[in-house]
Amino acid sequence: MLTAHVDTSEMKKLVSEMKQLDPNLRKYFVKELKTDLQPFADQIQGWINRNASPPLSGFGGHGGRTAWPTSVKATAYVTPSSRKSLARIEVFGRGQNKAAVKIADLAGTKGTYIRTTQGEALIQELNRRFRNPNQKAGRFVWQQYISRRGEMIHFIEKTINEFADIVERRISG
């Protein structure tokens, strides 16, 4: 019997069964999960728009893609057959200023940035202003995600259970 566990192997099995039974069922599943998560993305977006201002002067005063945006957009993506994750929430600046928030969120988290004096100053200032207990995760999205994780999982499990029941009924005939 298919049961709802947020486990990639179980998700792959469920998605595979949905594809075989009805390709539209998988599309509907993805749509429902995204519908569950987008309100959380909207909450994260609101928090960033209220609390995150340019971390260094270099993010302001120019019109390039790394200029700090006046607002950000957060979007939930659902990829149930992906090896990396079931879903993710990403933030981007609006308009032509798309990159600055993403750079500030992830700067120094993977340890693969180009080490320059400016880069080190950026990371130190970001770490001072946005304390992050998980140094390998983003400063804005990750912190807000963690505070909402339990509630998100509740909605995701509910949707997974509903679709597992649909697949089980169709398999059983």
Image (spheres, grey):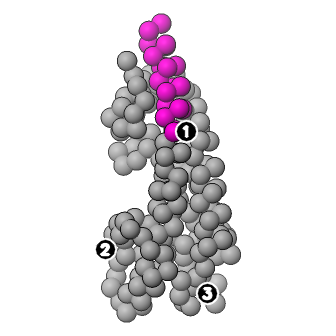
| Residue 69 part of the magenta segment | no
Q: Amino acid at mark 2?
A: Gly
| Secondary element at tag 3 | loop
**Label placed on residue 122:** none
Label 3, label 2: how far apart the Cα atoms are: 25 Å
Q: Which of the 4 image quadrants contains residue 155?
A: top right
Q: Earlier in the sequence, mark 3 or mark 2?
A: 3
Residue 108 shows in the view: yes
| Secondary element at tag 1 | helix
The magenta span reads 154-173
Q: Position of residue 19 (x, y in %)?
A: 46, 26
Within-10-Å neighbours for mark 1: few <14, some 14–19, many 20+? some
Circle 3 sits on which residue? Answer: 60
Q: Earlier in the sequence, mark 2 or mark 1?
A: 2
| Residue 171 part of the magenta segment | yes
Within-10-Å neighbours for mark 3: few <14, some 14–19, many 20+? some
Between 93 and 47, the one nearer to me in the picture: 47
